[in-house]
Image: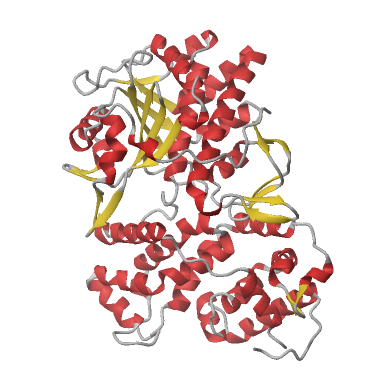
């Protein structure tokens, strides 16, 4: 037998090297196991950071819109609240000045049914006149009292205080979200429509859509799309890499676009069918815990602040970190830049240094 | 696996008492395990699974037979098990590849030789049509570069079984690709 079949197979799918970041992530995860001496859950948070930042914003935006409906007022009373003492929280008020919301959430488990860890992700979201900035904080970040996730386990006040002391970020409001609500929200509004300029696929995540056309994504596809990092567009008779070297920037771009489309869809759905707001609230309410100082009027202003945003005013980033020995520490000076908008010590967020990526997917009403 | 220093078996044995040593196994093999996983499941999933292989290996290191100098068959075996948990991802991925409209048949040949990129959809369809055990054997051979013996160790079956799985997989692949040149020499 000749080896033509094997040669073709090898040539067709060249071996991709891991990125330095993925490699560092994996090694860090192994080190954690070595230190802890226990077996970790197989599906970890590798590579999910920007996604989680996007999900945090998506759920916040959708939630705020739903919440603003008078029809769900009685549901709002059912949202679990947690008391965070005044001394811990800042006094930013939505609609009046920049406000920082700490979103603590559980990661959707795509592969395992494991729900053993309550806190998977910690995201800072800042609303200001110039846009929304979401910053993912690594749960294993080393802080004075242990790891950030341990601080979280000691309650919201302790976590908020730790973030102020260690990172200099003042938190005005605290929200806990079960991100599993994301898929259900998308399904409940009948899917989210996005415009694709041509046939699009991501052979890595298995995502595929036809174009040029508007396509409606259900909850599961929506998550696959938000997660996509290797989008190819069929044009001029061949599949081309739609993202090229700008993969991460463009991923931000389509996540931004997605957040916009989802919020629009939620508004339409509620407009068409007021009862939908109640059903959405029923999905969302069990998935939320908010600080007791979050008043209904403020929530309504939050909606105004969020829905008026252009998608390009949404910035998603991750706190720069490094592995030192067996510890995960913040990497300076990059971390200071990322944290600047949350410290309020600079008028303009440093993230604007990143140029807004050009649209590969033109904004198109669906 | 050649080169100076202790072989994998020694390192793993030493890591029982000195767990930090296990990072040497990671340093030696992560890139290859990652590449194999990414070829099968895509980078997105490999970002998770690649690391999980070593966490799994670390927790099972006490069961490693330390006279085995090369840990690759063991690690690829763990990877194979983890890949099976993502069967749906692999199927969706191959489906997406197979869906690309077939190009002009003439385009399959470039300079008188078959072109792997043009044949991609057919390769994907062929891989999708294989039994899962046969696909494991084929890809561990073609992509991971394991020998028949290594594949037997990795998948926990006799060498004869590996031989027949490979034979069947390659036969199916070749007929799908319409490869009829029985004497094409290996370059």
A310 sits left or right of B111 in the view: left
Q: Is residue A233 left or right of residue A278?
A: right
In the rendered image, the vertical position of residue A180 relative to residue A238, given as above or below? above
The residue shown at (42%, 37%) is: A316
Residue A77, visible in the rendered structure = no
Residues B34 and A241: in front is A241
- Compare residues B16 and A190 and report the one nearer the observer: A190
| Residue A88 placement: quadrant | top left
Picture coordinates of residue A84, whole percent (x, y) = 26, 22
For residue A195, above or below residue A66:
below
- Quadrant of the image containing the C terminus of chain B: bottom right
> Observer-nearest residue: A161 or B157?
A161
Q: Position of residue A277 (x, y in %)?
A: 57, 16
Residue drawn 51% across and 76% down?
Answer: B154
**Pick the front one: A232 or B20:** A232
State whether residue B65 is above or below residue A237: below
Let me know if residue B46 appears in the view.
yes
Q: Which quarter of the rendering shows the N terminus of chain B?
A: bottom left
Q: Position of residue A301 (x, y in %)?
A: 43, 13
How is the protein colored in the picture? secondary structure
Q: How many marks?
A: 0
The quadrant holding residue A94 is top left
Return the residue found at the far left: A144
Which residue is at 53% across, 31% downward? A259
Where in the figure is residue B44, as x and y percent of width and height? 52, 54
Residue at left offset 37%, top offset 77%: B64
- Name which quarter of the figure residue B14 lies in: bottom left
**A67 over A22 or under it: above or below:** above
* Residue placed furthest toward the right: B105
């Amino acid at each position: 037998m000749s080896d033509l079949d094997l040669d073709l197979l090898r040539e067709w799918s060249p071996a991709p090297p891991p990125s330095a970041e993925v490699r560092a992530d994996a090694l860090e995860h192994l080190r954690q196991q070595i230190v802890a001496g226990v077996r970790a859950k197989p599906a970890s948070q590798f590579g999910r950071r920007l996604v989680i930042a996007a999900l945090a914003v998506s759920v916040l935006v959708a939630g705020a819109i739903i919440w603003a409906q008078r029809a769900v007022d009685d549901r709002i009373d059912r949202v679990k609240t947690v008391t965070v003492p005044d001394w811990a929280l800042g006094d930013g008020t939505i609609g009046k000045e920049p406000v920082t919301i700490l979103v603590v959430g559980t990661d959707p488990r795509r592969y395992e049914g494991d729900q053993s860890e309550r806190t998977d992700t910690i995201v800072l979201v800042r609303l200001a006149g110039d846009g929304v900035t979401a910053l993912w904080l690594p749960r294993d970040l080393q802080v004075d009292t242990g790891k950030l996730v341990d601080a979280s386990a000691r309650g919201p006040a302790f976590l908020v205080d730790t973030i102020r002391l260690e990172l200099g970020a003042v938190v005005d409001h605290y929200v806990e979200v079960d991100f599993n609500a994301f898929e259900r929200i998308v399904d409940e509004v009948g899917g989210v429509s996005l415009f694709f300029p041509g046939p699009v696929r991501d052979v890595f995540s298995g995502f595929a859509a036809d174009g040029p056309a508007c396509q409606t994504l259900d909850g599961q596809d929506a998550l696959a799309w938000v997660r996509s990092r290797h989008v190819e567009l069929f044009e001029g008779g061949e599949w081309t890499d739609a993202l090229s070297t700008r993969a991460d920037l463009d991923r931000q771009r389509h996540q931004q676009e997605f957040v916009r489309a989802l919020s629009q869809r939620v508004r339409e759905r509620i407009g068409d069918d007021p009862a939908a707001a109640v059903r959405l609230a029923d999905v969302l309410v069990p998935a939320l815990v908010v600080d007791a100082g979050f008043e209904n009027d403020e929530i309504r202003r939050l909606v105004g602040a969020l829905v008026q945003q252009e998608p390009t005013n949404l910035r998603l980033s991750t706190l720069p970190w490094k592995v030192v020995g067996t510890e995960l520490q913040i990497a300076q000076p990059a971390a200071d830049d990322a944290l600047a908008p949350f410290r309020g010590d600079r008028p303009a967020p440093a993230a604007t240094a990143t140029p807004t990526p050009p649209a590969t997917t033109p904004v198109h009403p669906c | 696996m050649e080169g100076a220093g202790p072989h994998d078996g020694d390192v793993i044995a030493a890591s029982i008492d000195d767990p930090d040593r296990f990072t040497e196994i990671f340093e030696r093999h992560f890139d290859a395990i990652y590449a194999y996983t990414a070829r099968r499941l895509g980078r997105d999933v490999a970002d998770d699974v690649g690391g999980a292989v070593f966490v799994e290996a670390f927790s099972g290191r006490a069961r490693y037979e330390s006279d085995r100098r090369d840990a690759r068959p063991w690690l690829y075996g763990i990877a194979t098990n983890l890949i099976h948990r993502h069967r749906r991802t692999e199927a969706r991925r191959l489906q997406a590849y197979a869906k690309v409209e077939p190009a002009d048949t003439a385009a399959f040949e470039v300079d008188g030789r078959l072109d792997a990129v043009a044949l991609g959809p057919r390769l994907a369809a062929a891989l999708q049509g294989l039994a899962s055990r046969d696909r494991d054997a084929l890809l561990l051979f073609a992509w991971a570069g394991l020998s028949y013996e290594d594949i037997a160790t990795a998948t926990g079956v006799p060498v004869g079984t590996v031989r027949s799985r490979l034979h069947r997989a390659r036969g199916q692949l070749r007929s799908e690709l319409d490869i009829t040149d029985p004497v094409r020499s290996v370059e």
